[in-house]
Image: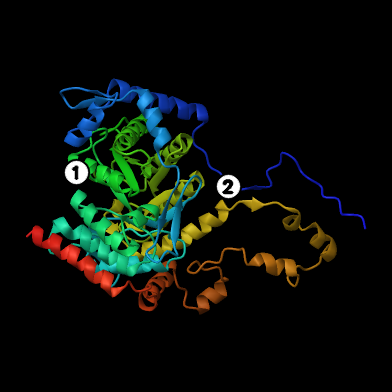
Amino acid sequence: MLEKTMLIKMNQQAYGTAMFQILTEDQIEQIYFAALDVLEMSGGRVFHDGALKLFGNSDAVVTDTNRVRVPASMVKLALGSCASKSNLTGRNGKRSVKLQKNEVAFGSGADTPFVYDRKIGERRKSTFADVEAAARTVDYLPRLDFCMSHGLVSDAPNAKTADRHQFLAMIKNSTKPLVVTSVDANGLRDQWEMACLIRGGDKEFRLSPLFATYIRSDSPLMSNNETVDKLLFATEKGIPAVYTPCAVLGVTAPASIAGVLVQTLADALFTVVLCCLKKPGMPLLVGGIQTVMAQDKETLSYGSPELHLTSTAMAEIYKWLGLLSSSPGGCTDSKVVDEQAASESVMSIYNNLLAGTNLIHQVGCLDGGLTGSLSSLVMCDEIIGMVKQIGKGIQVTDETLALDILKEVGPGGEFLSHDHTYDHWKEWFRPTIIDRSNFEVWSDSGSKTYNDRLEPEVDRILESHAPEPLDENIVQEMKKIINLADNKEV
């Protein structure tokens, strides 16, 4: 019997995902070389004794004014030492986030001092119970991959230990990986010790980190001691760190987009070098929040096109350098969940996903990151689903071209009853809250608006979803760590 001849198509990309690119490679090189010039000529200011010692024992130039200038050769070596891949794994080992090239993960926001209380229609201070509710909501939502606090614990016994209580609220109510914040390095140490209780030790945590630590710097190229303390501790213990330098165009950074990209990259590379000097191989994600001042000149805009443009560009630059990237997305300047919130959230989610940003945080945050909203989390989860569907691109194969089906059905035929239709309709995106019915059906169902449908879905999640419980013995050991910290700060 003759074997069937297989036709091979050479030099053809059969399956491509959607792509989005802001910068050319030549432009990226220009920005990178300019950032190297900044590090060599201006450098950064360091006030941390341990960091100064690390730089002083290297090829960096340290002056008596705490100015540290870094040669390009050190940057190149440091870039080669950074981990290009890391994983975050939830507490039960079943849910993980792959941090590597072209992998994208979405998660909620952190440290919002307020929450939007849906029952009273007003914002108020966030509490332990609010962080629990947010974690439980994130645990349920299928397109959110990791959990951030989505609120501060204003009712903690002491503000200096609120981060430990925050960690407990999150870990009890979500089995997804966490991205945490800490008041200082002592708080980070306690969070790490609590995570090691779950993992079974520090070596197991290093192999399978339960959380990443989010470290924000608001002073470009001049990190405070608290920031450096947390970075160095994370490097020592193998805790993945999300380093986020922040800048305001025309205020703490150049007003031009290219200029703020240079400054942000220089800041990020300075941090990469520092972590490498402490311990090569640090799992570090670098990002940035570079935006404009809002109209009141008192708040930063989370919905500006400039923020999304710089975020996308930085993701491209970091990918070119072999670094992991992070960025805010799914957030808004709107004070409530409305048309503005939806449009601004869509823009940032779409751009970041197509750019391949590895860790997209702040999903569900209102009011420039000051207010957490469960309704916005649920809305953005559906938006992420739509954008991911577009991001899949179009698979072109002999099977999907459907020539045999077209010949079989013929002109004017119907495809509804064909097996091919059944096989592929399962791939279509099906919304939960978005309405696609005709006018008569919609009207007969009560003419409900999007928000009319959204709020009951939030209630349903909170009432019906119960995360897998955490071992009570571990919870009690965690509470001992928290109580010890509370008593120290009295």
Q: Which residue is mark 1?
A: 226
Q: Residue furthest top?
A: 41
Residue 113 shown left or right of residue 382 in the figure: left
Quarter of the view holding residue 217: top left
Whether residues under marks 2 and 1 lie with C-beta atoms below 8 angstroms apart, the answer is: no
Q: Is residue 280 above or below residue 109?
A: above
Q: Is residue 95 above or below residue 285?
A: below
Q: Which residue is mark 2?
A: 18
Q: Is residue 403 left or right of residue 331?
A: right
Kindly identify which numbered label has been placed on residue 120: none
Q: Earlier in the sequence, mark 2 or mark 1?
A: 2
Classify 10 Å Cα crowding around label 1: few (below 14), some (14-19), many (20 and above). Answer: some
**Image point 35% across, 27% down: which residue?**
74
Q: Amino acid at mark 2?
A: Ala
Residue nearest the observer in this picture, 474 or 318? 474
Secondary structure found at label 2: loop
Give amino acid for label 1. Glu
Q: Residue at x 22, y 34 (%)?
A: 51
In percent of width and height, residue 180 lies at: 29, 55
| Residue 27 position in % (x across, y down) | 48, 28
Residue 115 in view in this figure? no
Q: Is residue 66 left or right of residue 363?
A: left
Query: Which residue is found at the position 30% from the left and 57% from the top?
Result: 335
Please give the name of the residue rendered at 72% of the width and 53% of the height, measured from the top-left corner. 397
Closer to us: 412 or 468: 468
Label 1: element kind: helix
Judging depth in this view, the residue of 208 and 294 nearest the camera is 208
Query: Crowdedness of circle 2 by 10 Å Cα count: few (<14), some, many (20+)?
Result: some
Q: Quadrant of the C terminus?
A: bottom left
> Can residue 190 be seen by looking at this rendering?
yes
Q: How far across and down, in percent of the image, does residue 12 sit?
A: 71, 41
